[in-house]
Amino acid sequence: MTLQQLADKVGTSASALHRYEAGWDRFEVATLRRIATALGAQLEVRLLAPEPPMLEKPDARSLVRQIGPLFWDKRLTVEDLASHPEWVLTRVLMFGNGDQARAARSFFGNDPIRDAIGRRGVDPRTRAYWKLLLGDDGASSSTH
């Protein structure tokens, strides 16, 4: 079965399935159930664990290496982290995997993430996920 055929059965896009295939770990259980059903499989969730604790703050160069592939339209630099944090975080929160998002959160802290999720272009599901993770009250809980 091609990705497009599976996407048609599931009711999603082939590009979304490709992201899952490539290791994107921001699944919705309903989507996983539809994928399992389309493949004649049963979805079994074995463990729900809390978000891992904050990582040690990475240095700027290692963060750029880790999240750089998310910036297909411009080469990400260390200077971009300081001069355009909302742009960087928006891209990571929208398209990054769990490891990339945790590294960015450790580097920037929670308050810049709150700022980034308020930007135009952040989809409602991503915004809701991060509001839930950070707390809906908007109280400051910066990690640095």
Image (tube, grey):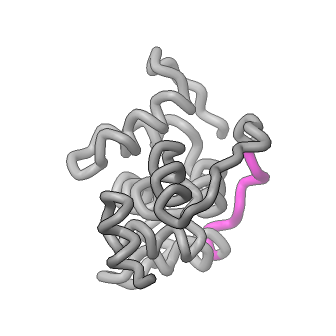
In terms of image quadrants, where is residue 94?
Answer: bottom left
Residue 89 image offset from top left, x and y in percent: 44, 55
125 left or right, relative to 42: left
In front: 141, or 43? 43
In terms of image quadrants, where is residue 143?
Answer: top right
Residue 17 image offset from top left, x and y in percent: 44, 69
Q: Residue furthest front?
A: 40
Is residue 44 shown above or below 13?
A: above
In terms of image quadrants, where is residue 133?
Answer: top right
Q: Does the rendering let one see residue 110? A: yes
Is residue 24 shown above or below 94?
A: below
Instruction: Look at the magenta stretch and give its main secondary structure.
Output: loop
69 left or right, relative to 72: right
Question: Which residue is at a point 53% across and 66% down the rendered structure image?
Answer: 39
Q: Does the rendering let one see residue 83? A: no
Question: Which residue is at a point 59% across and 26% down the rendered structure image?
Answer: 141
Which quarter of the figure is the C terminus placed in? top right
Q: Does 55 appear in magenta? A: yes
Question: Which residue is at a point 55% across and 76% down the rendered structure image?
Answer: 22
Q: Does 6 appear in magenta? A: no
